[in-house]
Image (cartoon, rainbow, N blue to C red):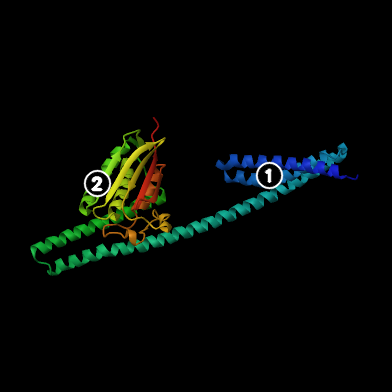
Amino acid sequence: MSINGADAAQIAVAAAVAAIGISCLGLLLLRVSRRRSVAVSVAIVALTPVVTVAVAAVAGALTMFLSSDQLGVVVLAAITAGVAGVPVAVAMARSQLRYQQLTESRERDRAIEASRRELVAGVTHDLRTPLAGIRAMAEALEDGVADEPATVERYYRGIRTETERLAGMVDELFELSRIQAGTLQLTMNRVALTDLVDDALASIAPLAKAKGVRVAARARPGTPIEADASELGRALRNLLANAVRHTPSDGTIEVHSDERGAVAHVTISDACGGIPEPDLAHVFDVGFRGSTARTPSPDAGAGLGLAIARGIVEAHAGQISVVNKDGGCQFVVVLPLADV
């Protein structure tokens, strides 16, 4: 049976319409199955092209005015080809998925290992300074080199100060390890965000006063949030301490808290001079210290404060970000409001 141009066009249109319909159905099913198991998505990806070809072949055959026997042969051939192609298609899709997952896993492991090595190297370097100071003062006291009462008292105060620095670093490492391991346990209660901000400001006041940094706060009372007051308070203190450390004397830090729709915002603006644009994406990385514009002070810890703050905020289903603004940096914490 010969087929003229019009018949060929009709067959092509019928096959194309059927193929497009099945393809759209496959995309819809794939979208719906995103929250289900990976196996379901793989099966849909594998079956869609096979079913598309089979249905397109049958649709094209239906426009050819074939006899019932001939049409039956075409349908049987299409179904047989489709069934035979399904296992191969599924196997190929699963193999490609496993390869992609393995590649992503290796890259993620390499990144984690590189970050871990960098963290260990940085913390080791940071621990040497207080340890060296403690050792030197202890040896001086032990050998009797420092025997004047005023000197002895100063050395004891120095040992205590350095010990507190070490304890702070160890505490930061422990907190970060819990966050990264996913073992951070939150005790959620309904609290007022303004109270958490006020407590954080009170705890950071001595550091700001010692450096001569002014802190201007403006809080707007509103809907409470569901939070672990201790952990979220720690995140706010870390952000404020970071702002104080990098703001020059006689500088001003502005702290605002308010509501915007269904979320609460806490904005902390410092006068650090800004962060180079290439470094903005790494501010919350573990051990990040930044450029000379943000050289850490002797009490800056192990460079884990911002990473811990991000982990705590994200554990509260919130977000944290930083931008350069008005000659300084502006950190913004966004938290969901509690259900009324």
| Residue 203 tag number | 2
Tell me the residue that label 1 is attached to.
48
The residue at 44%/61% (across/down) is: 114
The residue at 83%/44% (across/down) is: 8
Quadrant for the C terminus in the image: top left
The residue at 62%/54% (across/down) is: 96
Disc 1 vs disc 2: which is toward the camera?
Answer: 2
Q: Secondary structure at mark 1?
A: helix
Q: Residue furthest right?
A: 1
Instruction: Indicate left or right for 182 with 236 as reference.
Output: right
Quadrant for the N terminus in the image: top right
| Residue 271 percent across, percent down from the top left | 31, 52
| Residue 211 percent across, percent down from the top left | 22, 54
Q: Which kind of residue does numbered mark 2 sit on?
A: Ser
Q: Secondary structure at mark 2?
A: helix
Q: Earlier in the sequence, mark 1 or mark 2?
A: 1
| Residue 23 percent across, percent down from the top left | 68, 43
